[in-house]
Amino acid sequence: MGLRLSVAGEDLDGVHIGDGLWLGSDLFWRFHAALKLDHPAHSWCFEDDGRVVGHAALDCQAARLVDQCAGFLWVVPEARGKGVGNALRGVMQETAAEHGFRTVLIGVPESDPQGRDVAEHWGAVLDAHHFESTLDLTALTEHQVAAWTAPAIRAGVTLHPVEDDAALADLYPFARDRFKEAPDSGENSDELTLDVFRAMAEPANMLIARRGADLVGMTWVIHRPGQPPATNTAFTGVHPDARGLGIALALKAEQARQLRDRGYHTLFTQNMSGNEPILRANQRMGFTPGPGWFDYALATSDPDQASAPRN
């Protein structure tokens, strides 16, 4: 029984059964490898008699604050109360402190009240709340899609697929700037890198909006593991000068239609409380709100000894 570094490519889906924040080993490792190209990134497992019963990861780049990084921690329910979470928390806090961070932002699924109790017992401070909502794609009609896309089309907006990896790379500066503007990014977050963008986005899963020659919006999804087939909105962003034209709604509606035609049954989306434009678009499309998650800011194990805040 003990802690170890996880192995790149290791199948971690089994330990995350019931974890509402987990989107699969494939995406985790792709994202993890991209993060490590520009910042330290770590992943640990806790084993009991050869079985992985806990997993934690840490991304050592600024998340909202210059001295705050992002991490996550999950322990299978039947292994809780045995010190697994404390061991993972300790190595995560110590590593974050070594890299000069004073807090770690961790997510706790709203469907896991025990997780909130533990986070607060550790002294973590509630930072934000995110909604998760679902759309039944099998019930989507052509009439609905036409109605939802009409305002943007009347404003001269056209919707386009992304042809290939070269076209995807050309979209990176737009995605980077929209990420920086997102409510849950924070003005001090490290910017989205090209490698992370390419790890998150695939041409076939992206849709963009143009007004004339100008790129004004984008959205893309990622596959969620499991059956029946489901997918998850990764990001939707609109240029500030083009907001108020119904572009986000049009992008989400047309992409939902395409996903339905590709055989997906459900579209998941997560949005931070207070992001009213996207929440209104989701409500208009008939997304059903469900349990989301809470962000908690967890102090590093020895914050007074951490290095000076990063620039």
Image: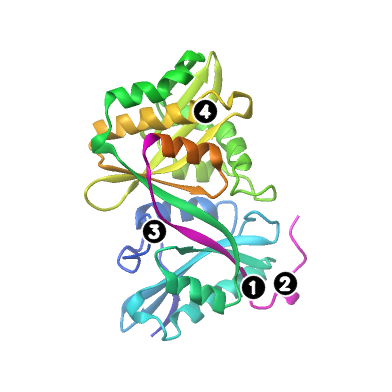
Task: Say which label, 1 or 2, has the lower sequence index.
Answer: 1
- Identify the image quadrant of residue 105: bottom right
Pointer 2 residue:
306
Task: Say which label, 4 or 2, has the lower sequence index.
Answer: 4
Three-letter residue code for mark 2 = Ala
The circle on residue 300 is: 1
Measure the alpha-carbon separation of dots 4 and 1. Answer: 38 Å
The circle on residue 217 is: 4
Q: Nearer the viewer, mark 4 or mark 1?
A: 4
Measure the alpha-carbon separation of dots 3 and 1. Answer: 24 Å
Q: Nearer the viewer, mark 2 or mark 3?
A: 3
- In the picture, measured across the screen, residue 64 lies left or right of residue 3, that is right
Protein image colouring = rainbow
Three-letter residue code for mark 1 = Thr
Foreground pick, 162 / 262? 262
Measure the alpha-carbon separation of dots 4 and 3. Answer: 27 Å
- In the picture, measured across the screen, residue 130 lies left or right of residue 256, that is right
Kindly tell me whether residue 59 is visible in this rendering. no
Pointer 3 residue:
22
| Stretch in magenta | 285-311
Mark 1 surroundings within 10 Å by alpha-carbon count, few (fewer than 14), some (14 through 19), many (20 or more):
many
Task: Say which label, 3 or 1, has the lower sequence index.
Answer: 3
Q: Position of residue 223 (x, y in %)?
A: 33, 45
- In the picture, measured across the screen, residue 97 lies left or right of residue 31, that is right
Q: Are marks 4 and 3 in contact (CB under 8 Å)?
A: no
- In the picture, measured across the screen, residue 230 lies left or right of residue 29, that is left
Q: Is residue 290 above or below residue 55?
A: above
Task: Label 2, secondary structure: give it.
Answer: loop
Three-letter residue code for mark 3 = Trp
